[in-house]
């Protein structure tokens, strides 16, 4: 049993090294094929990385949402503080700011240019207000439920939250996400076709060798194995090029992205693939290369039989 396992491992090693040797023998053709695969994989990988960065950025924007609670006119500052403590313990909020009626009037005075009219009023017409900062990661539906529950409190006259822009942003992100996956699927199919066509040509070029191997008793698995490894090597080479292209593009965009992030007071917008992303790209590329070679071998190898 042990000898059989060792023999199986050695057969695969020989097939893998032999496939790599055949790729290195035809360097120009192999490089062109790997470059096509690399570009085809780099495009969806770059789009997905950009989408991931945009989701991180919009998450920060969503976290900057505010819920404004306008209190009843008879609610004093002490009751407002108690209400803030109650809300802080019962709702997912990151912070609460109390805006007194006097502070609200002073802010309205600075923004409205209505000093004369405001001086004619016998009393302050503005109520005290609590401004809530929802906890990061709070979704639109949860924010909507929070508004309904907060507005039902006896001391609250009205609760306001502008959810429309959040819903529009989520709809745009969902549309973009689906578009990226659609492009990734189409380009993945193109990688399978490119590798399949390349392996088909390799099979045709080695037709006589395959016929002789079958005549002396070689199994289909034995003949198939080197071609599968060729497809795997094509995928890995294309995946490596894809990672290099994506990271090069990110490096070229890093400076303007950092400048834009500084204007919005956020962190750098462009994060790299990271170890997990690189492994995912290489794994997807290797899988596509292996799938393309498997389709080509399964279709064309069976048609070659000794006569």
Image (tube, helix red, strand yellow):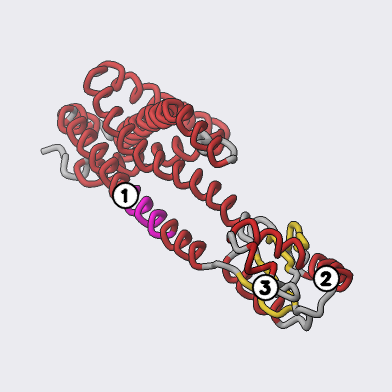
Please identify the residue farthest to the left as the structure is shown: 307
Local packing at callout 1 (Cα closer than 10 Å; few below 14, some 14-19, many 20+) is some
CB contact under 8 Å: marks 3 and 1: no
Using the numbered discs, state the Cα–Cα distance from disc 3 to disc 1 in whole angstroms: 38 Å
Along the line of sight, which residue is nearer the eye, 215 or 167?
167
The residue segment tinted magenta is 174-184
Using the numbered discs, state the Cα–Cα distance from disc 2 to disc 3 in whole angstroms: 18 Å
Q: How many marks?
A: 3
Q: Residue at x 28, y 43 (%)?
A: 192
Local packing at callout 2 (Cα closer than 10 Å; few below 14, some 14-19, many 20+) is many
Residue 273, horizontal then vertical, whole percent: 51, 35
Q: Secondary structure at mark 1?
A: helix
Residue 3 visible within the image: yes
Vertically, is 299 above or below 129?
above
Q: Secondary structure at mark 3?
A: helix
Q: Residue at x 19, y 28 (%)?
A: 206
Which label's residue is closer to the chain start, 2 or 3? Answer: 2
Residue 39, horizontal then vertical, whole percent: 31, 33
| Residue 146, label in figure | 3
Residue under circle 2? 80
Q: Residue at x 69, y 67 (%)?
A: 119
CB contact under 8 Å: marks 2 and 3: no
């Amino acid at each position: 049993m042990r000898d059989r396992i060792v023999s199986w491992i050695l057969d695969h090693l020989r097939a893998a090294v032999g496939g790599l040797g055949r790729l290195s023998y035809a360097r120009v053709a192999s490089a062109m094929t790997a470059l096509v695969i690399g570009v085809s994989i780099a495009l969806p990988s770059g789009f997905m990385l950009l989408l991931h960065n945009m989701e991180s950025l919009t998450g920060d924007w969503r976290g900057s949402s505010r819920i404004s609670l306008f209190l009843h006119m008879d609610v004093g500052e002490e009751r407002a503080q108690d209400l803030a403590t109650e809300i802080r313990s019962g709702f997912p909020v990151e912070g609460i700011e109390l805006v007194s009626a006097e502070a609200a009037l002073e802010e309205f005075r600075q923004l409205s240019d209505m000093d004369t009219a405001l001086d004619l009023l016998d009393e302050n017409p503005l109520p005290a207000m609590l401004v809530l900062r929802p906890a990061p990661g709070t979704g639109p539906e949860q924010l909507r439920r929070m508004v309904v529950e907060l507005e039902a409190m006896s001391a609250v006259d009205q609760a306001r939250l502008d959810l429309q822009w959040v819903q529009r942003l989520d709809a745009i992100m969902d549309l973009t996400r689906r578009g990226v996956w659609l492009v990734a699927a189409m380009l993945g199919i193109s990688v399978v076709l490119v590798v399949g066509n390349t392996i088909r040509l390799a099979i045709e070029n080695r037709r006589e060798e395959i016929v002789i191997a079958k005549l002396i008793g070689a199994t289909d698995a034995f003949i198939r194995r080197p071609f599968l490894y060729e497809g795997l090597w094509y995928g890995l080479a294309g995946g490596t090029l894809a990672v290099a292209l994506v990271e090069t593009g990110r490096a070229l965009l890093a400076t303007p992205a950092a400048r834009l992030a500084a204007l919005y007071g956020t962190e750098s917008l462009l994060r790299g693939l990271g170890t997990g992303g690189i492994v995912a790209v290489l794994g997807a590329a290797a899988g596509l290369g292996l799938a393309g070679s498997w389709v080509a071998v399964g279709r064309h190898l069976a048609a070659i039989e000794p006569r």
